[in-house]
Amino acid sequence: MLLLLAFGAGCIDPPETNATENVTPAPVLHYERGGVSIPINVSEIPVRGFDANVTEVIEILLADQRAGALLEGGWKIASVQTSYDYDLRTHVDVEFRSDEPSPSFFIEVDEQKGHTGWGRCNVPLWLGGPFAGPYPEDYHQNWTPRRGVDWIYVFDHHNDRVVMVYNETTIFYLYPSYGREWYESVEASG
């Protein structure tokens, strides 16, 4: 037994006092448009589900107009989650959240094809009427077809306002300022 301990004792090298580590710092990507530059520290984004190449996902995402509207509106990337759609195709959902209490908005990213897909908000759909059930406490969304486009309005009950107007591929309005002129003209036209 002592012989085994003697042989094993020489197999461990002591750590070097000036050893340097090969650590690659996590990339910081930037959303840039005009004079706006918003840094995104990829290492701070939680990944849920199985592994995704977060750097690649965020690079694809930053080319999407919806991501720009959300980031410029003060929303932050809250998480990246891998999941499957109804065809068992893998995709990544990137979650955005505002600093103030608000719903989340998700944009689908297809890493394999290198583009973004549909977007959605995570609040309940409530259409009203006698059979609609109770009025949601915090937020709800209402689907409205207008001029051949399905528009989804997200309502904030605490502040009695519209937070967002979007469809699967575009954010038309985001409180407080993105798309304000568009939103006011649509509301004026009925």
Image (spheres, rainbow, N blue to C red):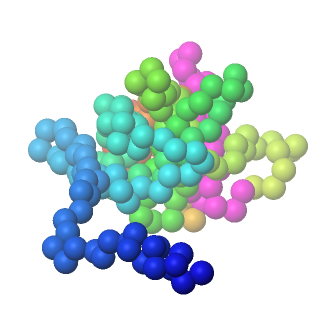
Question: What's drawn in magenta, residue-wise?
Answer: 136-157
Would you say residue 51 is visible in this rendering?
A: yes
| Relative depth, front residue between 177 and 35 | 35
Would you say residue 184 is visible in this rendering?
A: no
Task: Please tell me in which quadrant of the rendered image residue 173 appears.
Answer: top left
Q: Is residue 179 left or right of residue 94?
A: left
Which residue is at a point 63% across and 44% down the rendered structure image?
141
Which residue is at a point 50% across and 52% down the rendered structure image?
47
Residue furthest out toward the front: 3
Residue furthest out toward the right: 131
Relative height, residue 162 to residue 93 (above, below) = below
Residue furthest out toward the bottom: 2
Q: Is residue 167 left or right of residue 59?
A: right
From the top left corner, tell me how far across and down residue 136 is, in percent: 72, 57
Which residue is at a point 38% across and 74% down the rendered structure image?
10
From the top left corner, tell me how far across and down residue 13 is, in percent: 32, 71
Question: Residue 174 lies in magenta, yes or no?
Answer: no
From the top left corner, tell me how far across and down residue 66 is, in percent: 39, 36
Which residue is at a point 41% across and 52% down the rendered structure image?
77
Quadrant (top left/top right/bottom left/bottom right) for the N terminus: bottom right
| Relative depth, front residue between 99 and 58 | 58
| Relative depth, front residue between 11 and 126 | 11
